[in-house]
Amino acid sequence: MELLEQASEYLRTGRLVAFPTETVYGLGARADWPEAVARIFQAKNRPSFDPLIVHFPHLEQACEWAVFDPRALKLAHRFWPGPLTLVLPRLWRNGQPRIPDLVTAGLDTVGVRVPAQPMALDLLRRVGLPIAAPSANPFGYISPTTSDHVRTGLGDRVDLILDGGPCEVGVESTIVDLSTPRPRLLRPGGLAREILETELGESLEYAGFAPPVRTEAPGMMESHYAPKIPVEVFEEVHSLRERAIVLKGRCVLLSTNPLKDVPCFDGFAMGEGAAMAVSLFATLRRLDNPESRQILALLPSPVGLGLAVRDRLFRAAASRVG
Ligand code: TXA
Ligand code: MG
């Protein structure tokens, strides 16, 4: 049987399939079966209060599971397929929500998206069912941007891993909550905030990164995207340099552009704009070995995809605090 056909058969019968999206690899199960969804939480060791994003091959199908108002339709038409998740009211039929509580962590809203990745779209079209898929990594660790990352992290806890090559965007989707009168940015991601605001014609409310844990988007808690070795983040190069001197250079550096005159084992420049998002997670994984001792990261400015990269670096660092 062709691999994609096998994958869709697995999903239909309640098994787990990891698949590429343009943002990160997802760990998929059919969203309308709590038994199938429960296996996602098990495989990832994910707490059940953290809701999942549901994936569709096109807007028309998503409209059968969530309630789209004119704002939601506008954003979906403009940005789907693409790295944008919309949080919308769940659709009810015969006194039941169509998307079960286990997917939404009991919330009356559901996160929905149409990914821009040919293999993902082909799979979703074949299955013809809503597919719940968080990032395909053990809970709290760095998200996977290659099928090898998935295999390393989840191995035989997944029934099938599809390989679509490295992800083109490299950070997760931007999450916008449209279930309230004022649209809110819940997670900065692969679609820049400025582009969304221009399309909406209004600004997005955004709480920013503010530990301790905010409960309305539980996945955005502190201990996320975290390497095993310590990460420290800096707004300015001179404070990073001072820290590196205190550490006697027993550290590796992460920044958009190469840093000069900072003592270290090694330094990695991610580049600017979309390039830094593409390489962020793979670079964090590469640096995440005991010889690096510690990662010192210079935060990019909060413009374009810089907002998402800052957010992920803050969270990678925050897991060490308290
Ligand atoms: O790019 C992505 O979005 C990837 C790919 C696989 O599509 N998925 C992803 O899923 O990043 P995950 O589980 O790692 O992050 C989902 C996060 C949750 O942790 C939560 O913060 C938010 O989405 N979320 C989902 N449903 C929500 C809801 N109803 N209300 C508020 N936040 C929600
Ligand atoms: Mg995740």
Image: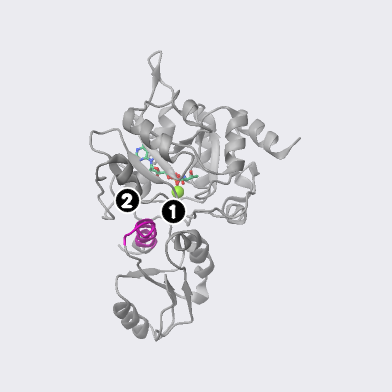
82 part of magenta stretch: no
- How far across and down, in percent of the image, does residue 151 sit? 62, 53
* Residue 99 x/y as whole percent: 44, 27
Label 2, residues with CA under 10 Å away: few <14, some 14-19, many ≥20: some
**Precedes in sequence: disc 2 or disc 1:** 1
Residue extending farthest to the right is 1
Look at the numbered disc 2 and say if its residue's Cβ is closer than 8 Å to ligand 1: no
* Residue behind mark 2: 194
Image vertical order of residue 6 relative to residue 47, above or below: above
Residue 172 visible at all = yes
Does residue 106 appear in the picture of this structure? no
On the picture, is 201 further left or further right than 220?
left
Residue at horizontal 49 percent and vertical 53 percent from the top: 169
305 left or right, relative to 133: left
Q: Is residue 110 above or below residue 203?
A: above
Residue behind mark 1 = 140
* Among the 4 quarters of the image, the one containing residue 107: top left
Please tell me whether residue 313 belongs to the stretch shown in magenta.
yes
* Type of amino acid at the residue the image marks with label 2: Glu
- Kindly tell me whether mark 1's CB lies below 8 Å from ligand 2: no
x and y percentages locating residue 275 in the rendered image: 48, 62
How many labels were placed on the picture? Answer: 2
- SS of the residue under disc 1: loop
In terms of depth relative to the viewer, which is nearer, 256 or 134?
A: 256
User: What quarter of the picture does the N terminus occupy?
Assistant: top right
Magenta-tinted stretch: 302-316
Q: Are marks 2 and 1 in contact (CB under 8 Å)?
A: no
Q: Nearer the viewer, residue 53 or 79?
A: 79
Q: Is residue 47 left or right of residue 201?
A: right
The residue sitting at 61% across, 36% down in the picture is: 123
